[in-house]
């Protein structure tokens, strides 16, 4: 009996190790050539071809569209000619990384999107080499708690604590609530009263609206979504693929767009 139990344990450990190694290799090995397809609009951009069938965000596509229609981020008029300025140079969009980085990476996300959490960790680790400038776009499409979290993060940005607030929201296992936001503000030594006031400020609302407009302009159907230089990425992407894409964008330049 003990031998059988021991054998089962060894088998389990071997399988666990195999899965772990396979996962590590999938995320770190250099991928083959990346495939792209042209998109009709906006002009000059392209899309990375990914396996959308296994994307962790598929389950949220329909829900995301419904929640966006019912939320307070209804889009005002938007001039498509200003896509580049709104995408890369909007002063209300929090940023991280050097202004002189060759590649600008724009991330659209929702705090209740599971894969957004994984992608946040990937981006955080990749940023250490300074190869790109990260631009955050709050796009809360998964309900009222998502909108509350997005507003709170942008309000935290007014006190110079966006990234810390963003990372805490991404790593929490709780659904964001007003009480959680207040507690988090206290832990980060923010002015809680000012944060709650800024959450409903017109410029915070406008920033979320602009993110929704950009998402619509690029035809995004769910989170996460990235724009890496001139390349659109929808859904899951491995770290290895993303690193290869950043390298490709840095080498090729803007390609006539923006």
Image (cartoon, helix red, strand yellow):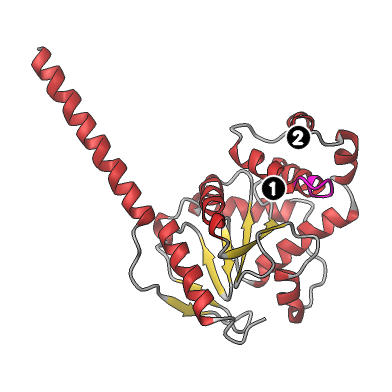
Label 1 crowding class (10 Å Cα cut-off): few <14, some 14-19, many 20+? some
Callout 1: SS: helix
- Asked if 227 appears above or below 46 in the picture, the reply is above
Identify which residue is drawn at 43% across, 67% down. Answer: 244
**Magenta stretch bounds:** 156-161
Disc 2: which residue: 188
Identify which residue is drawn at 19% across, 24% down. Answer: 9
The quarter in which the C terminus is drawn is bottom right
Q: Which mark is residue 163?
A: 1
**79 left or right, relative to 22:** right
Which badge, 1 or 2, is on the more N-terminal residue? 1
Identify which residue is drawn at 55% across, 55% down. Answer: 128
- Kindly tell me whether residue 74 is visible in this rendering: no
Q: Give the Cα separation between the discs numbered 1 and 2.
A: 11 Å
Residue that protrudes farthest toward the top in the picture = 1
Q: How many marks?
A: 2
**193 left or right, relative to 42:** right
């Amino acid at each position: 009996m003990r031998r059988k139990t021991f054998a089962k344990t060894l088998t389990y450990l071997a399988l666990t190790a195999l899965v772990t190694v396979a996962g590590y290799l999938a995320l770190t090995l250099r991928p083959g050539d990346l495939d792209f397809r042209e998109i009709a609009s906006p002009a000059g951009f392209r899309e990375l071809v990914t396996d959308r069938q296994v994307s962790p965000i598929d389950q949220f596509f329909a829900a995301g569209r419904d929640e966006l229609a019912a939320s307070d981020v209804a889009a005002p008029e938007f001039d498509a000619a200003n896509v580049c300025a709104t995408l890369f140079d909007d002063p209300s969009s929090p940023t991280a990384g050097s202004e002189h980085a060759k590649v600008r990476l724009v991330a659209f996300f929702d705090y209740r999107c599971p894969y957004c959490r994984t992608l946040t960790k990937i981006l955080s680790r990749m940023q250490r080499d300074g190869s790109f400038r990260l631009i955050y776009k709050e796009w809360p499409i998964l309900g009222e708690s998502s909108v509350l979290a997005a507003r709170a993060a942008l309000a935290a940005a007014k006190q110079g604590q966006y990234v810390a607030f963003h990372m805490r929201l991404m790593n929490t296992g709780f659904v964001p609530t007003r009480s959680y936001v207040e507690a988090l503000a206290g832990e980060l030594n923010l002015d809680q009263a000012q944060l709650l006031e800024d959450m409903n400020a017109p410029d915070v609302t406008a920033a979320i609206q602009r993110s929704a407009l950009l998402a619509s302009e690029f035809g995004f159907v769910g989170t996460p979504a990235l724009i890496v230089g001139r390349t659109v990425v929808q859904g899951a992407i491995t770290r290895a693929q993303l690193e290869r894409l950043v390298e490709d964008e840095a080498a090729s330049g803007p390609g006539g767009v923006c």
